[in-house]
Image: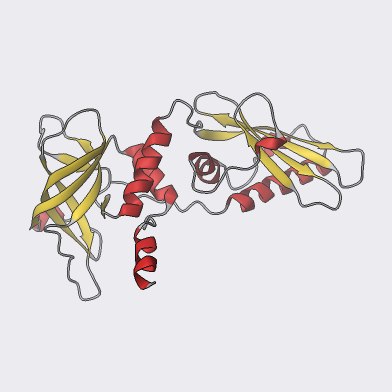
């Protein structure tokens, strides 16, 4: 039974889904590799290293190209900042299998640059599977668009007290329509749905957590509804629309993303 539990744990990602998406969106090159050598970098070349981290130049043998514009050399080198333990010791990097989120370096085919100096993670089956799934979803022609803001928001009361619906129209980078519908029915829990298209369909339902559509909403929607979105609504209807928008945000949950810049 213990082995079964350990096996199940090993297939779970160690990195939050939203952080993985952040990295995939920023990284034109994703490498699965085994580190062959690691040389510590000191002095001026490590002056900007954050506290409790050590900079290394590593060379690694490529196991697989998860994402990339074409073939890569079988061995690559890059700089990486790794955290130290409570005693100030760095992890053993040599022979460690890792996944690196990176970009190519012009004129240096044997070197890559991480999108952030700590955008190298230890390989695990769970993270490997999650990254590959995100890459497929991001590159799909049917990938949901990036949310850039809120358009118009309307609340339409129903015929019964407490009945009504709020329609939230989102602005997207591509211009493709995305909208959210929140339904209120007397004696029932509020329901909501998201639609990718011109028709707002309550049957669509909310997105499953840890999917690209969930990420677009949870990480792309502003935390408060801008006043301009309900500027044409009566105060009472605007207040209900704001309540429904907050309900959607709470239903989506927190976006656990925060990938530091390189």
Residue 260 in view in this figure: no
User: Taking 257 as reference, is 243 left or right?
Assistant: right
Residue 142: x and y in percent read 49, 27
Q: Quadrant of residue 90?
A: bottom left
Instruction: Tell which residue pokes out farthest to the right in this image.
Output: 160
* Number of disc labels: 0
Residue 218 in the image: above or below residue 44: above
Instruction: Tell which residue pokes out farthest to the bottom in this image.
Output: 87
For image coordinates 44% across by 48% down, the residue present is 18
Residue 61: x and y in percent read 11, 45
User: Taking 193 as reference, is 215 left or right?
Assistant: left
For image coordinates 63% across by 43% down, the residue present is 206
Front residue of 39/24: it is 24
For image coordinates 11% across by 35% down, the residue present is 73
Report the colour scheme.
secondary structure
Front residue of 260/62: it is 62
Residue 250: x and y in percent read 63, 53
Residue 8 in view in this figure: yes
Image quarter where the N terminus lies is bottom left
Front residue of 48/262: it is 262
Residue 81 in the image: above or below residue 102: below
User: Taking 116 as reference, is 223 left or right?
Assistant: right
For image coordinates 17% across by 30% down, the residue present is 71
Q: Quadrant of residue 184?
A: top right
Residue 255: x and y in percent read 50, 51
């Amino acid at each position: 039974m213990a082995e079964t539990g350990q096996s199940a744990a090993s297939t779970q990602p160690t990195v939050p889904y939203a952080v993985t998406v952040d990295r995939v969106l920023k990284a034109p090159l994703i490498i699965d590799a085994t580190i062959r050598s690691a040389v510590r970098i000191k002095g001026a070349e490590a002056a900007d290293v954050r506290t409790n981290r050590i900079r290394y130049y590593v060379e690694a043998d490529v196991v697989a190209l998860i994402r990339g514009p074409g073939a890569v050399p079988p061995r690559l080198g890059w700089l990486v900042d790794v955290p130290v333990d409570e005693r100030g010791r760095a992890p053993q990097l040599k022979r460690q299998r890792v996944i690196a989120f990176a970009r190519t370096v012009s004129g240096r085919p044997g070197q890559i640059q991480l999108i952030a100096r700590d955008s190298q993670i230890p390989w695990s089956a769970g993270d490997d599977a999650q990254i590959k799934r995100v890459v497929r979803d991001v590159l799909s022609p049917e990938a949901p668009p990036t949310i850039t803001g809120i358009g118009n928001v309307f609340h339409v009361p129903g015929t019964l007290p407490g009945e009504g619906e709020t329609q939230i129209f989102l602005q997207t980078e591509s211009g493709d329509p995305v909208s959210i519908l929140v339904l209120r029915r007397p004696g029932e829990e509020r329901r909501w749905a998201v639609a990718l298209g011109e028709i707002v369909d309550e049957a669509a339902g909310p997105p499953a957590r840890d999917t690209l559509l969930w990420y677009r909403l949870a990480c792309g929607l502003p935390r408060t509804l801008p006043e301009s979105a309900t500027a044409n609504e009566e105060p009472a209807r605007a207040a209900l629309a704001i309540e429904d928008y907050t309900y959607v945000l709470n239903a989506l949950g927190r976006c656990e993303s925060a990938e530091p810049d390189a």
